[in-house]
């Protein structure tokens, strides 16, 4: 296939087209699927192209619908459930946490739930506490759920296809604040059969002075910070976590042992979150080293998202503030 | 009689919408076997006896601490499993709950593997990973059971969605109790399956208790089929201790179901002879669960009623039936003895069941 430039949202749309065309047992179910604006343009043309029988617009029943998709996946179908906002997905916690992630284990491998749950993060624009949450760390605490968080159009495309083909429960989290990001997509991976579980965090950019680690939307911020650090002759190594459960920390550990400076940025909350897990894994693996690694953890403040515009501006920490913190911690 | 008692607990007047079905003394004692083949009646009786004898054995083993996982026994409710599942054919998908030994056995699930599972042995039906509450035998269409209340209702609806998308004329069946009807996802599932005319049978085993608590203290009416009406689903409320009635109700609707005119909701009224979990009768635990009620319900025992009816109609002699039960009991003992000989070892594949 030829290379082409895609936006992040177009990449998701392309992945759906690829899956639905190639696998007749695949279908999509959730709210807002027949609306052109509800889930960005990620579902564009799908009902027309593949029929409303396979692009199923559902009642407002997150728990039931997610459980139903689990049931279909246990019977050789390839369902993708869509939760247009991650906040509402909490209603489906039983289907995800108690049923899907444990089915194979509880029944000694007799069957496995292979459902893909696409969950979308949106935030800002005075939407407030119930329209803003990045809850992936909560679910990453549960063994049996693969949590995929793409930050580039390539990963948005590639990891969605791999999620659907994986014989496990997958939560695929995409971020509305990344929808207009553009890049080229390389289709070569389609020729290889690579298991989603073999995909690790990726070195987005090599460097020597500091390791910057993030995921999803945070990756966009890190690129901005990297530009600024470059001007001050600081070379940063950037790591995109991509899959946070099961979490393979090796790439982070190796980079941290090289740079001895680690900044983890997460646009979710800090307590018991993936940012803490990254630092913990690096620390545990640095016990024998004589040189200390310095850490900085940047997350959202420990309170829900406000609606007031000015409070909101403080809440989603800006690149310049992050840069100041980095300089103060590592390079003063 | 529940209505009378209720006044002690709530100030709302309880609707006994089940009328006579909630009172075992008002049941018709004989089962109408008209139009049934002798062969089928024998199978019904045998299967119910198999479940009863297995559950009795399990209760004994729980009491003696041979089986240590939580075991929720279905003694007294055998007619529902047998009546419903005798309508299944290959490809149908059945989902259970915490109280599923009967479902598993009525479908022909492997008894040896059930005994092994209850003892936690890796040769069990769930490789010793499930115990009593998580059992499966996909070779007979028993797709799995788990204990979260209403947990497998969406799963079964998902299976029915598969049947509809593939148009393969299979159906799915969800077994659940009266407690599950108080869960949100139950209502979401009724709504969705009605909207999409899914080929699923919702089997509400209404034993009038959820764990320790009487239905009258949990719902304003004791009739569960009212929920199906709200969702425009064809529904029946039947005597769940009458295996022929349960069987025929499903059978008469099966064609429509297989041809895309689902769903179907059947509420079967019954009563469990044992407590919510374990081997004893729990008359001291349940709110409103009295020894007197239990005695009355035992007179309404589904196996006893079928046996008497068959005897009265001169289809099988009393002696023949006793002999049948004796033989089945011997078989159950043999299967247990086999499972007992196998040594308990760790399941070494435990990490292979996660992803």
Image (spheres, coloured by chain):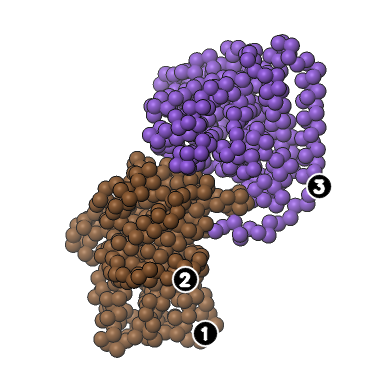
Residue plotted at (34% across, 44% down): A52
SS label for mark 3 = helix
Residue B9 visible from this viewpoint: no
Mark carried by residue A200: 2
Q: Position of residue B193 (x, y in %)?
A: 42, 35
Question: Disc 3 or disc 2, which is closer to the eye?
Answer: 2
| Chain A, hue in figure | brown
Count neighbours of disc 3 (C-alpha within 10 A) and say few if under 14, some if 14 to 19, many if 20 or more. few
Q: Quadrant of residue B338?
A: top right
Colour chosen for chain B: purple
What distance separates the C-alpha of mark 2 from that of mark 1? 24 Å
Looking at this rendering, what residue extends furthest in the front direction?
A1
Q: Secondary structure at mark 1?
A: loop
Most extreme residue toward the bottom is: A233
Q: Residue at x 54, y 25 (%)?
A: B250
Q: Which mark is residue B341?
A: 3
Of marks 2 and 1, which one's residue comes earlier in the chain?
A: 2
- Looking at the picture, how far across and down is residue A120, in whole percent? 34, 56
Q: Which mark is residue A289?
A: 1
Marks 3 and 2, how far apart in space? 46 Å
Note whether residue A287 is visible: yes
């Amino acid at each position: 296939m030829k290379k082409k430039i895609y936006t992040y949202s177009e990449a998701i749309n392309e992945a759906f087209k690829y899956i639905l065309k190639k696998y007749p047992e695949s279908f999509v179910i959730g709210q807002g699927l027949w609306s052109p604006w509800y889930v960005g343009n990620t579902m564009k043309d799908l009902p027309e192209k593949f029929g409303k029988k396979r692009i199923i617009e559902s009642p407002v029943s997150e728990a039931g619908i997610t459980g139903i998709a689990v049931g279909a996946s246990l019977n050789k179908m390839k369902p993708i459930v869509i939760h247009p906002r991650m906040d509402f997905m909490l209603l489906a916690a039983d289907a995800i946490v108690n049923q899907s992630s444990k089915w194979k284990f509880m029944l000694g491998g007799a069957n496995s739930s292979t459902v893909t749950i696409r969950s979308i993060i949106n935030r800002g624009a005075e939407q407030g506490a119930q329209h803003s949450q990045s809850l992936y760390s909560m679910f990453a605490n549960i063994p049996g759920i693969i949590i995929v968080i793409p930050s580039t159009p390539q990963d948005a495309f590639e990891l969605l296809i791999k999620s659907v083909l994986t014989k496990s429960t997958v939560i695929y989290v995409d971020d509305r604040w990344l929808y207009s990001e553009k890049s080229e997509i390389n289709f070569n991976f389609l020729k290889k059969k690579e298991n989603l579980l073999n995909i690790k965090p990726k070195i987005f950019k090599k460097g020597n002075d500091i390791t910057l680690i993030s995921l999803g939307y945070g990756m966009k911020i890190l690129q901005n910070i990297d530009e600024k650090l470059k001007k001050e002759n600081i070379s940063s190594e950037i790591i995109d976590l991509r899959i946070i459960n099961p979490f393979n920390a090796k790439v982070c550990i190796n980079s941290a042992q090289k740079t001895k400076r680690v900044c983890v940025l997460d646009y979710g909350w800090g307590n018991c979150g993936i940012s803490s897990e990254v630092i913990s894994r690096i620390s545990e693996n640095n016990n024998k080293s004589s040189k200390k690694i310095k850490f900085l953890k940047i997350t959202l403040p420990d309170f829900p998202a406000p609606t007031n515009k000015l409070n909101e501006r403080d809440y989603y920490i800006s690149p310049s503030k992050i840069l100041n913190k980095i300089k103060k911690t590592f390079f003063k | 009689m529940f209505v009378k008692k209720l006044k002690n607990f709530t100030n709302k007047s309880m609707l006994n919408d089940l009328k006579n079905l909630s009172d075992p003394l008002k049941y018709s004692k004989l089962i109408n076997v008209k139009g049934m083949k002798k062969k089928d009646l024998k199978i019904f009786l045998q299967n119910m006896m198999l479940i009863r004898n297995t559950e009795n054995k399990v209760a004994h083993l729980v009491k003696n601490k041979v089986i240590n996982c939580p075991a929720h026994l279905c003694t007294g409710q055998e007619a529902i499993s047998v009546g419903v599942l005798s309508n299944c054919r290959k490809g149908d998908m059945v989902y259970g709950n915490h109280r599923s030994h009967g479902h598993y056995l009525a479908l022909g699930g492997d008894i040896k593997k059930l005994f092994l599972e209850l003892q936690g042995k890796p040769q069990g039906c769930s490789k010793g990973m499930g115990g009593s509450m998580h059992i499966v035998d996909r070779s007979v269409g028993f797709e799995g059971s788990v204990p979260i209340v209403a947990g497998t209702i969406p799963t079964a609806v998902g299976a029915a969605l598969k049947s509809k998308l593939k148009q393969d004329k299979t159906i799915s069946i969800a077994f659940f109790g009266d407690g599950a009807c108080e869960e949100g996802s139950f209502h979401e599932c009724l709504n969705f399956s009605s909207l999409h005319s899914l080929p699923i049978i919702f089997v509400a085993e209404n034993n009038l208790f959820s764990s320790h608590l009487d239905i009258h203290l949990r719902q304003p009416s004791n009739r569960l089929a009212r929920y199906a009406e709200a969702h425009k689903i064809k529904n029946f409320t039947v005597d769940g201790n009458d295996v022929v009635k349960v069987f025929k109700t499903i059978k008469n609707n099966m064609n429509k179901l297989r041809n895309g005119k689902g769903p179907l909701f059947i509420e079967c009224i019954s009563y469990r002879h044992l407590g919510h979990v374990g081997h004893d009768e729990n008359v001291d635990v349940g709110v409103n669960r009295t020894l007197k009620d239990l005695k009355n319900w035992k007179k309404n025992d589904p196996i006893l009623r079928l046996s008497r009816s068959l005897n009265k109609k001169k289809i099988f002699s009393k002696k023949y039936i006793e002999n049948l039960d004796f033989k089945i009991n011997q078989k159950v003992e043999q299967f247990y003895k086999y499972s007992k000989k196998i040594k308990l070892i760790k399941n070494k594949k435990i990490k292979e069941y996660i992803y």
